[in-house]
Amino acid sequence: MIARLRRLGYNAPMMRLVRAVRTGIGAGLRTAVWLLLIMLPVSFVVLLLRWTGVLEVVSDLLSPVFRSIGLPGSSALVFLSSLLVNLYSGIAVMSELALSMREVTTIALMCLIAHNFLVEIAVLGSTGSNPLRMVVLRLAAALVAGLTLSLILPANLATLDTAIGTRVREVEPQNFTVALAAWGRESLELIGRISLILLALMTGEALLQELGVVRWLGRRLGPVMRVFGLPEETAFLWVVSNTLGLAYGAGVLRREVSTGRLSSVHGDLLNHHIAISHSLLEDTLLFVVLGVPALWITVPRLLLAFLAVWARRMELAVRARRTGREDDYRSRSLP
C-alpha cells in the first residue's frame, strides 16, 4: 500500500500516517486474539467453579485470614470473586452482604490491588516479569493494604451507609444451560468490546509514536516517573495502565517490550508499579460512586507501588554489586 500511495503522489507525512495505522491495526488484532485466548478459558473455568459451589468452599477456607484483618469471613467471597473474575463481580457479591463503610473501604482497596488476577498476571508475565513473583507481590500487597487500613481507618466510617444496596444485584442461574447461555452471550459482547478498544488503542498509540507525542509525554511526566523510581520512557505506558487498565493496555505494553523500545529491566520495574496500582481512573470511580472515600483507596495503592519499585531497584542493585555488574545495572535501569 505504501508503494501504491507513493505512485499516486502522496507525500511522506501521509505515508507515515498510513504506515502507523496499518501497524496499529495489525498489532491490535494480534493482541485481541492473544488476550481472548486467555480470558475466555479462564472465565469458563470460573463459571464452572461458581456454578458447582467451589468458590464458596474456598472462601470459607479463607475466612480466618479475613477475620484476622478485621473483616467478616464472608468478605473472602468478595475478594475471591474480584480475584478470579473482575471488580464488577466483587461488587455484586458485596451487595449481598451487610458490610459497614469501614469494611467496604478495606475490601475495596484489596480488590483494587488484586482483581482479574489470572488475566493480568499473564499480561505482566508477557512484558518482562516473573509471573510467580507478580502473584506473590499482588497478594502480599493486598493483604498488607487490608491490614493497614483495618488499623488506621477512622472509626466513624463504620457508622456510614454505603450505596451498594441500591445497585442491581447479580442473579446466579440455577440451571447450567441458562448459566452457559449467559456466559456465551457475555463472551460475545466481550469479544466485540475488546476488539474495538484494542484496534482503536493500538492505532492511536502508533500514531502518537509517529507524531512524537509519546516522547513529549515522557518529558512532561519524567519528574513524576523518577519519584516512582521508573524510567522516563515508561511515562506513556503508565498513563495507559492508569486510564485503560492492564487488560486493555496489554497491547501497548507488549508492543513496547517486543519492539525493544522498552527494555526488559525497565518493563519489570514498571510492572512492579502497575501490578499494585493501575486503572486509577475507572476502577477507583466504581467504588467512589458507592460512597467509598477516594483518598483511602488511591493513596495506599500509589504508596505501595512506590515502595515495591524502590525495593525492586535495591534488590537489583545488590545483586549487580555481588556479581560485579553494577555499571551495567546503572546503565540499564536507573532513570
Image (cartoon, helix red, strand yellow):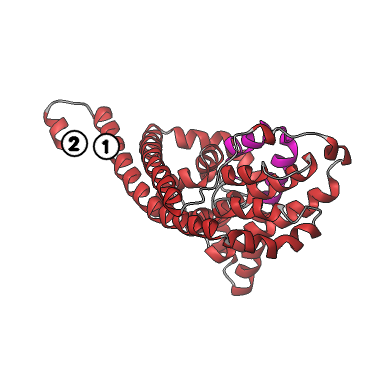
Label 2 neighbourhood size at 10 Å, few (<14), some (14-19), many (20+)? Answer: some
Q: Earlier in the sequence, mark 1 or mark 2?
A: 2
- Residue 280: within the magenta? yes
Q: Which residue is mark 2?
A: 2
Dot 1 amino acid type = Arg
Give yes or no for contact between labels 1 and 2 (Cβ–Cβ under 8 Å).
yes
Residue 265 located within the stretch drawn in magenta: no
On the image, which quarter does residue 98 sit in? top right
Q: Main secondary structure of the magenta part?
A: helix
Q: Circle 1 — which element? A: helix
- Numbered label tally: 2
Q: Is residue 143 left or right of residue 47?
A: right
Looking at the rendered image, the quarter that the N terminus falls into is top left
Disc 2 marks a residue whose amino acid type is: Ile
Query: x and y percent of residue 26 in the render?
Result: 29, 44
Q: Which residue is mark 1?
A: 19
Residue 127 shown left or right of residue 171 in the figure: left
Identify the residue at image location x=38%, y=39%: 202
The answer to which of 179 and 239 lies nearer the viewer is: 179
**Magenta-highlighted residues:** 278-306
In the displayed structure, 112 sits above or below 204; it is below
Q: Which mark is residue 172?
A: none
What residue is drawn where x is 85% and y is 50%? Answer: 151
Residue 312 at least partly seen: no
Q: Can you tell which quarter of the image residue 53 is in?
A: bottom right
